[in-house]
Image (cartoon, helix red, strand yellow):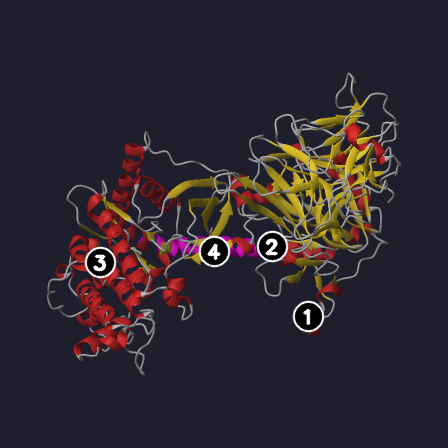
Amino acid sequence: MNIFAFVLFSSSLLPFFFVPSDAADSITKSKSLSDGITLVSKHESYALGFFSPGNSSKRYLGIWYNNIPVRTVVWVANRLNPINNSSGLLMVNSSGSLVLLSQNRTVAWSANSTKQARNPIVQLLDSGNLVLREENEENPENYLWQSFDYPSDTWLPGMKIGWDLRTGLERRVTAWKSPDDPSPGELSVGIELHKYPEIVFNKGTEKFFRTGPWNGLTLSGVPFLLKENPVYTYDFVINSDEVYIIFNLINNSVVSRALLNETSSLYERYIWVSREKKWSRYISMPNDDCDGYNLCGPYGNCIIGDSPICQCVEGFKHKSPDTWNPDEWSKGCVRNTQLSCKDKDKIGFAKFVGLKMPDTTYYWVNRSMNLYECRDKCLNNCSCTAYANSNIENGGSGCAMWFGDLIDIRQVAANGRDAYMQDLYIRMPASEQEEKDKQKMKVIVIVVLAIAVAFGVLSIPYCISKRANFREKLENIVMIDQDIEGQSEDMEVPFFTLATIVMATNNFSSYNKLGEGGFGLVYKGTLIDGKEIAVKRLSQKSGQGLSEFKNEVILIAKLQHRNLVRLLGYCIEGDEKMLIYEYMPNGSLDSFIFDQTKAKVLGWSMRFNIICGIARGLLYLHEDSRLRIIHRDLKASNILLDSKMNPKISDFGMARIFGGDQIEGNTNRVVGTYGYMAPEYAIDGLFSVKSDVFSFGILLLEIISGKKNRGSFHLDNTQNLVGHAWKLWKEGRPLELIDTCLKGPIIQSEILHCLHISFLCLQQHHNDRPNMSCVVMMLHGESSLPEPKELGFFVGKKSTSSSKNQSSSTNEITVTMLEAR
């Protein structure tokens, strides 16, 4: 494309046009810009000048952020024609055109303004847009030329990406070839112009990702990019003059840019974090493997989390069922039953929800038709394979129809985001659809009958158990409600919208996944101010209900201790329940102590600091906070490590609050993790501060040994870590337990002291165990310690007797009484 018209001008006038001040935001015929001088926009947001990218010595004219210490270039003029020295000169020539000259009087670049200006002025705006206009123009936005029409690798707020249909101008973002070379690379993004336009990413001439068409609220393939969100608003404009997408910031104090990165093949959106003096990425596309263009072929549906990720749309089967592997996925799927166009009564449509709309190359749209008219039109055209509303805003409108095979489909919506998606209706044989409806009805009838029978059978024991549990549940509810009422006035826990979290986590991208707990997944996120967060997203299938969720919010909101994780906020929206925590860059303790490579990072001094930090955190929960709190799920994976490896106790979903002088309680609903439960809790449902002390003892053993308690340490699998450690202690061989990473006689003495403390915490009877205040003193004291009595749960996994009296000395736990993980 011939973008620029080259206009020659003599460089002999250079001294006359020299600009002595770099505070100006504009140049005219009487002023120019030479290398070493910059234009600065009115409010000093952007600067225009000459620069050399990366390690290159070549000079380019570009625009960058003026107040950001890391020079970030957002636009380059002479991408294809760099200047080899500092002789560059930007000026307005006698005919009113903007030109860039080098010392040998050659034109390195020029702006292709179609109209000549009588009194031209070139001005750098605070939007980052360089414009050419008439100096005395009544409408200051009546530009003769603007840099926003010719993007480089960066998309800025207020910049249109798309087409001016009146002039044929395409505004397209193209990546730099490399950090040292701003010339156009292979990666580009723009709007593919057809009846139902969509944003398409290309590598050279090949598509490699598309966003899906605009449906009035979002782009169907990236539903987390909503029309309105906490950071910016999108507009997708389609009319007879223009087709473009534009975004504008809601808060102008936020500095945000979108970058097309050739190196990573990603579209990345960044915000500037001033306090950390760095750019923080919070959105990237493509987002995962399913974003690869047409990965699964015709009628293939890409589903992240399924194995294989390519599945056939219902009503279709694999084209190569015997060799269905990644090499065959692009062949796609074929119909189970071939269609016949002779009899319309034999044709129906199956509804699909939450899909990225198929590729719109072979497509027809009518924005005035309703969905019923759309169905009839598709039904009467044998080539029509699917239809949908073209716009779902305000209940839906318009007709979109597809012809030929449906390609580049993927599952994108779930957990409340279906509301932002079009329903897609795919052409099917009516017989198949009727059979499908019959099967659904049969399933519904069977399920209803089964529920009715089960309800009748279980009603009697349920009533009995209901009566037995009523008192405990009532106490729990009253306790939670009282706590909410007592703290509602001064409890300030910020609420985060689902849109905010979706954007922060890049739509819960698999790349942002930090881990998986008993109640769901944990994701890393970045807020618009650059703050990094950890989002605990509770699974709908988890056992944690609204009461446990409230419990965790209430507890952590009021807990302020350096060894407890800090709650930043929460989100309840639709089926989603999420907790937002401070981000711990080093993850959880278990990822270090149980990994042979990473364990070497944790020397004894660091491990001892972690042990003491956990002990202080528990002491605060048990004795120093306003209410006594029993954690009930203390384990290595619930200990998080900050940037300095300081420990923070997390996951309070199972915690219990005690008021006044209450020191213990019991429950019929035992929750927690196998291997960490105190015997009186696992067997009898009795919990107290001493059950947390027992869990601390297990944790202490694991930190010392680098081994998990639930492992086997005997040939017949009858000994766990506690049994193994106690056996070595009794035989005078405790040094054999110590992690091989830990060496030195002084260190061994301190480790044996901690090992002794762990045995005191693991004693069978809870009254024999020390409280956490004693544990903290013992950790820092040098006085002799009492001999531990018999330990709890040290015998292995096999029960030696069926006698009830001996059950407390085994690890054989009845699953029906547990909600353990």
Q: Are marks 1 and 2 in contact (CB under 8 Å)?
A: no
Q: State which region is magenta.
A: 440-460
The residue lying toward the viewer, choosing from 269 and 152, is 152
Q: Position of residue 278 (x, y in %)?
A: 53, 44
SS type, badge 3: helix
Q: Nearer the viewer, mark 1 or mark 4?
A: 4
Q: CA–CA distance between discs 4 and 3?
A: 28 Å
Q: Earlier in the sequence, mark 1 or mark 3?
A: 1
Residue 370 among magenta residues: no
Q: Is residue 12 left or right of residue 75?
A: right
Identify whether 816 is placed above or below 480: below
Residue that badge 3 annotates: 693
Residue 441 among magenta residues: yes
Q: Residues within 10 Å of mark 2 (few under 14, many from 20)?
A: few
Q: CA–CA distance between discs 1 and 4?
A: 31 Å
Q: Quadrant of the N terminus?
A: top right
Residue that badge 4 annotates: 514
Q: Amino acid at mark 1?
A: Trp
SS type, badge 2: helix
Residue that badge 1 annotates: 324
In which quadrant of the rendered view does residue 13 lie? Answer: top right
Q: Residue furthest bottom?
A: 715
Q: Position of residue 510 (x, y in %)?
A: 55, 56
Q: Amino acid at mark 2?
A: Lys
Q: Is residue 686 visible?
A: yes
Q: CA–CA distance between discs 3 and 2?
A: 52 Å
Q: Residue at x 53, y 53 (%)?
A: 512
Disc on res. 440: 2
